[in-house]
Image (tube, rainbow, N blue to C red):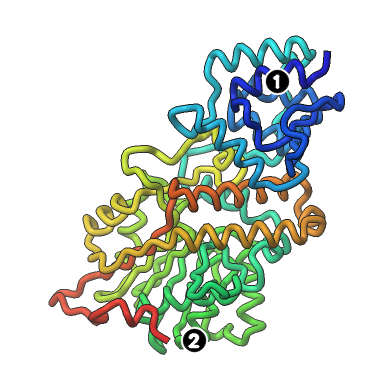
Amino acid sequence: MSVASVIAPLVEGIVGTHLPVRLRCWDGSSIGPASAHTTLHVNSPDALRRLLYAPGELGLARAFVAGDLDLDGDIFDLLDLRDLMADRRTDLSLRFTWAQRRDLLRAARRLGALGRPLPLPPEEARLSGVRHSKARDRTAVTHHYDVSNDFYRIVLGPTMAYSCAYFEGPDNSLEEAQQAKFELVCRKLGLRPGMRLLDVGCGWGGMALHAAREHGVDVIGVTLSRPQAELAGKRVAEAGYADRIEIRVQDYRDVDDGPYDAISSIGMFEHVGLAQLEDYFERLLALLRDGGRLLNHAISRSHPDKSSFDPDSFIARYVFPDGELHEVGTVVTAMQRLGFEVRDVESLREHYAKSLRQWVANLETSWDQAREFVGAARAKIGRLYMAGSALAFEAGRVSVHQVLAVKPSADGASDMPATRASFVGS
């Protein structure tokens, strides 16, 4: 009795009969099309054991990260398999039905895969304390960002920008598109020489450097990641802008040196929980001068009534613990309820899909080097996360919006341009 013959009915019940990949089991047996370009290796009975204790996405993720499952071929083929699993259900949770759990148990028993739960992969986040407290947020951020600056340089390229680029033309390089994104933000904020800009979640300093170099502003950049701040500070010094840019390891809730003329928040908002939404905008509003602008650039979910937080999802456990996506209408309402005037909302969904595919290509091109920097498990996490996210943006399951808002002045006067043309001018 081969392993493949035992798990074939289980696989068919979960995925269907049309496998996009070939499954090769630890005894050498296999199922799926022999012509498939991609092979998923089931290296150990432990893969089934992990599924028994977490039937669905989390168990699969643990098996993949731990090496019980491995991939030879195209990561996007593997995600086609994931989508087939989702298509057979009414949602995208990938939690198994009771019938599927029963079949899994039977297969595991026949293959000797029963036993106590296996240790969790060390790469899985284990947070404690109150969600979105300062201490817990710091731990959540360091889990993802403090793994290796060198790894992120491989993936993101020279700009070290970990948010979607802005492709003004089909032939733009990733670096050109990231600089175009920074310029788009600067134009929306109306930056001029001598202004003060607060960059919330400044990352490795790309936005701060662009704003100071191209628009002559003074910048305070804050991040919770010490390795990010150290590299950002080094980049600032090497570029000769240490007198114009200050990088701090600081929670946005502790910034108290306003007023600022403008605030940018690019790719940080995903770490702000729904319960903290009003506090976040209230604090940023207080830091702005009258007439000052806020540009909030963030991934968003499509439905206002469905929570994006699933503590048992792959992303919550391995990528962005405590991360939450907010529907753009909810965001706009929260901003205006607190006193902002929202002036512009723009979706860059297709731009993020293209950015992610380029990040995946960068990672795969330098795969061996990436594994040296962060280890095989974390490299696999990054590859799976970015490829899955690219498909989610392409399918419209998630989006990304830039929301531009103004702190109204007492007389209602505004220096906003008459049209959008100035946002994308040459």
Residue type, mark 2 in image: Glu
Query: Picture coordinates of residue 28 (x, y %)?
Result: 86, 27
Mark 2 or mark 1, earlier in chain: 1
The residue tagged 2 is 214
The residue tagged 1 is 8
Q: Quadrant of residue 364?
A: bottom right
Query: Picture coordinates of residue 17 (x, y %)?
Result: 62, 26
Query: Picture coordinates of residue 225 (x, y %)?
Result: 59, 59
Residue 77's place in the image compared with 223, above or below, is above
90 left or right of 355?
left
State how far apart marks 2 and 1 are (Cα): 60 Å
Residue 179 or residue 296, whichever sits in front:
179
Secondary structure of the residue carrying tag 1 is helix
Residue 130 or residue 353, whichever sits in front:
353
Secondary structure of the residue carrying tag 2 is helix
Instruction: Please identify the quadrant where the N terminus is shown.
Output: top right
| Residue 20: mark | none
Residue 286's place in the image compared with 278, above or below, is below
Determine crowd level at label 2: few under 14, some 14-19, many 20+ residues with C-alpha closer than 10 A.
some
Residue 74's place in the image compared with 87, above or below, is below
Q: Identify the residue shown where x is 32% and y is 64%.
A: 345
Residue type, mark 1 in image: Ala
Query: Picture coordinates of residue 378 (x, y %)?
Result: 71, 47
Residue 192 or residue 392, whichever sits in front:
392
Q: Comparing marks 2 and 1, which lies closer to the viewer?
A: 1
Q: Identify the residue shown where x is 59% and y is 46%.
A: 319
Pointers 2 and 1 in contact (CB under 8 A)? Answer: no
